[in-house]
Amino acid sequence: MLLGLARIYGTTVSELLGEAPPDRDAIVRGGPLGAGAEADGWRYRQAGGSGRAMQALRVHVPYGTESDLVRVHPGEEWLYVLEGRLRVALGESLHDLDAGDSAHFDSLTPHRIAALDRAGAQLLFVHTLVQSSAAELCLGNGIHRL
């Protein structure tokens, strides 16, 4: 029962019982995106601590891939374009974002992104990890690709 409650509230059984959580490193050192993970040409590097309800990533979105893959899943997403231009589809609306622009949306909104420049786009991406039985709504597999 406690495990079920912990999953619903995005925490651990230890935290529900008031136990002191282990110290987590608050600092994540930068480095090249190539040192992170890669899937289908998208490159990822962790930009925040692991094991938390909110995850931050630096992402390189390559030109011409994944533009038709639609994602739907519980949670929220926030992205900030560092370099390049990005097309964000939220439901039926399209938004072209330039460096310095951002988007913040409910992840249950069908969404997809694509880089508009041949060099791709670099972005900072933050999303919540909602633990629920509806998590299977996320289309695709492997690393989460916006």
Image (cartoon, grey):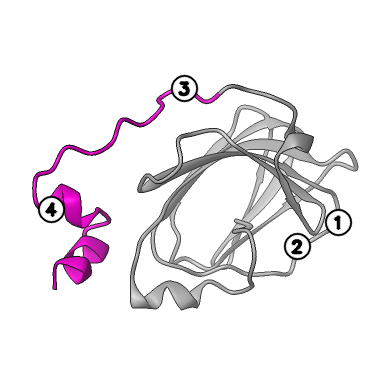
Q: Position of residue 19 (x, y in %)?
A: 13, 43
| Mark 3 residue type | Ile
Determine whether the residue tagged by mark 1 lies in a helix, strand or loop.
loop
Residue corresponding to mark 4:
16
Extent of the magenta region = 1-28
- Residue in the picture at 54% in, 37% down: 102
Residue corresponding to mark 3:
27
Q: Is residue 124 magenta?
A: no
Label drawn at residue 67: 2
Q: Farthest residue in the right direction?
A: 118
Task: Kindly indicate whether the residue at mark 1 contacts the one at mark 3 (C-beta within 8 angstroms).
Answer: no
Quadrant in the picture for the C terminus: bottom right
Determine whether the residue tagged by mark 4 lies in a helix, strand or loop.
helix
- Residue in the picture at 23% in, 39% down: 21
Label drawn at residue 86: none
Instruction: For marks 3 and 1, give the CA distance.
Output: 34 Å
Q: Position of residue 121 (x, y in %)?
A: 76, 39
Task: Kindly indicate whether the residue at mark 1 contacts the one at mark 2 (C-beta within 8 angstroms).
Answer: yes
Q: Position of residue 110 (x, y in %)?
A: 53, 68
| Mark 2 residue type | Ser
User: Is 3 located above or below residue 128 in the figure?
Assistant: below
**In-image side of 34 versus 11 (left or right):** right
Residue corresponding to mark 1:
64
